[in-house]
Image (cartoon, rainbow, N blue to C red):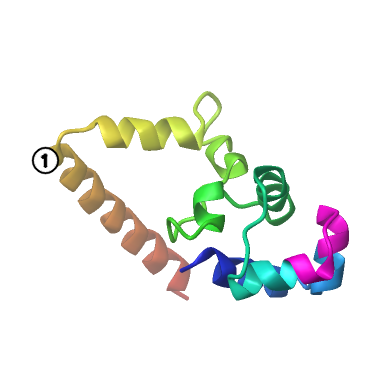
């Protein structure tokens, strides 16, 4: 997805008019319209502010990924001593065989969890 599309989707999903988002970002309604039409791009400071307003990562906002791994998500506690970002880094360091094993295990656990919560 392109930045212009992502911005419009996030704005509408969060219930902002172009006018209101412009006010929050200290830019004009016309600037927001131009961003959404792909006629112009915001400067880096406005982009950073958008990531905070929408609680998304810069990569997600710019349409470089379909996954929103914002700093808030990455910094969430996975358990008492480990953050989500650290878990992701650990998984990425695994060799291909162990990554496949991890994925199989995750799918099994998800299925088991779903079955437990769908059983009357």
Q: Between residue 15 and residue 8, name the one nearer to us.
A: 8
Q: Is residue 6 above or below residue 60?
A: below
Q: Residue at x 36, y 59 (%)?
A: 110
Q: Main secondary structure of the magenta part?
A: helix
Q: How far across and how far down the image is residue 19, in percent?
A: 86, 71
Residue at (66%, 50%) from the top-left corner? 47
Q: Residue at x 49, y 67 (%)?
A: 2
Q: Position of residue 26 (x, y in %)?
A: 86, 54
Residue 25 belongs to the span the image colors magenta = yes
Q: Check the image and report above or below for 103 versus 40.
A: above
Secondary element at tag 1 = helix
Q: Nearer the viewer, residue 6 or 31?
A: 31
For the residue carrying disc 1, how many other residues have a C-alpha within 10 Å: few (<14), some (14-19), or many (20+)?
Answer: few
The residue that label 1 is drawn on is 97
Write the start and end of the magenta stretch as one range.
22-31
Q: Residue 48 placed where, x, y %?
A: 67, 44
Q: Is residue 88 magenta?
A: no
**Residue 112 sits above or below residue 5 on the image:** above
| Residue 92 picture quarter | top left
């Amino acid at each position: 997805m392109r930045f212009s599309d992502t911005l419009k989707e996030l704005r509408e999903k969060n219930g902002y008019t172009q006018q209101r988002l412009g006010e929050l970002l200290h830019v004009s309604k016309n600037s927001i319209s131009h961003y959404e039409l792909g006629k112009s791009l915001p400067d880096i400071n406005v982009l950073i502010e958008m990531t905070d307003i929408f609680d998304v990562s810069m990569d997600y906002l710019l349409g470089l990924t379909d996954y929103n791994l914002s700093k808030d998500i990455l910094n969430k506690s996975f358990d008492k001593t480990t953050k989500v970002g650290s878990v992701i880094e650990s998984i990425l360091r695994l060799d291909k065989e162990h990554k496949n094993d991890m994925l199989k295990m995750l799918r099994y656990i998800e299925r088991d969890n779903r079955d437990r919560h769908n059983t009357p």
